[in-house]
Image (cartoon, rainbow, N blue to C red):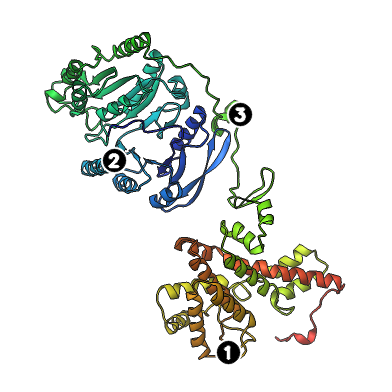
Amino acid sequence: MATGQLFSRTTQALFYNYKQLPIQRMLDFDFLCGRETPSVAGIINPGAEGFQKLFFGQEEIAIPVHSTIEAACAAHPTADVFINFASFRSAAASSKSALKQPTIRVVAIIAEGVPESDTKELIAFARANNKVVIGPATVGGIQAGAFKIGDTAGTIDNIIQCKLYRPGSVGFVSKSGGMSNELYNTIARVTDGIYEGIAIGGDVFPGSTLSDHVLRFNNIPQVKMMVVLGELGGRDEYSLVEALKQGKVNKPVVAWVSGTCARLFKSEVQFGHAGAKSGGEMESAQAKNQALSEAGAVVPTSFEALEIAIKETFERLVEGGKITPVKEVTPPQIPEDLNIAIKSGKVRAPTHIISTISDDRGEEPCYAGVPMSSIVEQGYGVGDVISLLWFKRSLPRYCTKFIEICIMLCADHGPCVSGAHNTIVTARAGKDLVSSLVSGLLTIGPRFGGAIDDAARYFKDAYDRGLTPYEFVEAMKKKGIRVPGIGHRIKRGDNRDKRVELLQLFARTNFPSVKYMEYAVQVETYTLSKANNLVLNVDGAIGSLFLDLLAGSGMFSKQEIDEIVEIGYLNGLFVLARSIGLIGHTFDQKRLKQPLYRHPWEDVLYTK
């Protein structure tokens, strides 16, 4: 292991298994230290995606949530620390998956009770791949003034009291997370504070050892002395003894092994940690303390004397000119959370909306990060703007041109279709533009213009499952479902919809692949054998071709394509396009000053 420091002021982590409090504590520590960027780049919550709102000082931020480790690592390639808050049942598997990612360098496993066989496997894999495991059964670690893992060092009040918001000169390593907090406080009282502190965890087989971190501290110039807190049980401390004897450590080491009271008991005693149980004289606290002392470490006579030993060692280094005590700084005030601030009269209110498609702050609005001036200067069209606002990316020109063609072809279909009819009736009733428009839009659904998504969904499912047109159509028939995108009230096999032909011609000329469209055409061939009006209509053409656009562009994953169809993006095209025509009909009726519409009696069948 050895090498140097693990963390810096720019270190970012991926947090596995969302826990609000430890993440917020990390972000509060970031703010306290004056970091410019949050230390949590992303959250991994299996089965969930989206964002989690948290505070970075007074600013509320949205941290991305990913459903898989692989997706999170791909989205945040600079995040090289994996903080695992999974339970002991899944901690090993998720940690192994993280260690396999090339971007992950350090894995901290918080859970207690991870099976020892799994831990051994993780240790072997990490060492073979030059990676670091902290834990299991750890609170984590901290680099003062730079980065901390989860709940390390506890509350903000404790962090301030221990002066962890700025770096000191002491490297500290312990098996115990709870005792780490105690020693951070002790070290801050009698030195200029810690530079880095690690709790390796109390299990029998820790992912990294006391000596691993001492040797690492020895290579960090800012660390001038080390404090080690071991405990009875196991033989980890003896690797440090050997390192000291071999001269691998050239900085002062103050060490104490807890558990000397074990000899007062008549039988063997299991202390708090799984590894804190003496298995013989060599594993006793007394034997370890003696070995460390003989190897050159500063070992006090008792735990109570540890503070004095640390103080005297630090003072000698200062007197010898090896340490220039850190100049004290005043940390910023962390805003209080709402439940606390209510009592004190101070609050910070959360936002209620998350927006990822546009930003109107600053000098000019941006669409998906593209400034308005760039959109105009680069000659973007309506299709380009839709690609930014709907799909959050700039699509190739043939894609945006196709979108524009769809809008043009679907803008209107005459005054007799239900949407236009409703708008005309509403406009003639003297209603305003918005009311007239909405009246027409509300008719859009599975029977009028709203079949694009369903057409795409069913064609995609059938094609992806390898169904023949016959199998697809007959299966739909058995379910009592009409095939969306097939059938027209007016058009026939010998009188095709010109809009469909234009869309197909453009796609065949410009798209890299039209596999879904060709499948829809094959379905049409079969349905025409049943009835002459079962032609591929404009809904089916747009639905199938949009699948080809999404799949052929190479810019969307399978999951994104399924989500686009599920959410209703494609029907959104029809809504957008037809709004143009409906607005036109509203203006037309008002310009013509048409009176209130009354349906003629002769067009109604009155019956009992």
For the view shown, which residue lies furthest in the front direction? 378
Mark 1 surroundings within 10 Å by alpha-carbon count, few (fewer than 14), some (14 through 19), many (20 or more):
some
Residue at the disc numbered 3: 346
Residue 493, label in figure: 1
Mark 2 surroundings within 10 Å by alpha-carbon count, few (fewer than 14), some (14 through 19), many (20 or more):
few
Tag 1: residue type?
A: Gly
Residue at the disc numbered 2: 130
Say which residue appears at 27% left-offset and 27% top-offset: 215
User: Quick check: 114 left or right of 403?
Assistant: left
Tag 3: residue type?
A: Lys
Helix, strand or loop at label 2? It is: loop
Number of disc labels: 3
Helix, strand or loop at label 3? It is: loop
Contact between labelled residues 2 and 1, with CB atoms less than 8 Å apart:
no
Q: CA distance from mark 3 to mark 2?
A: 48 Å
Task: Give x and y (percent) for residue 306.
Answer: 29, 14
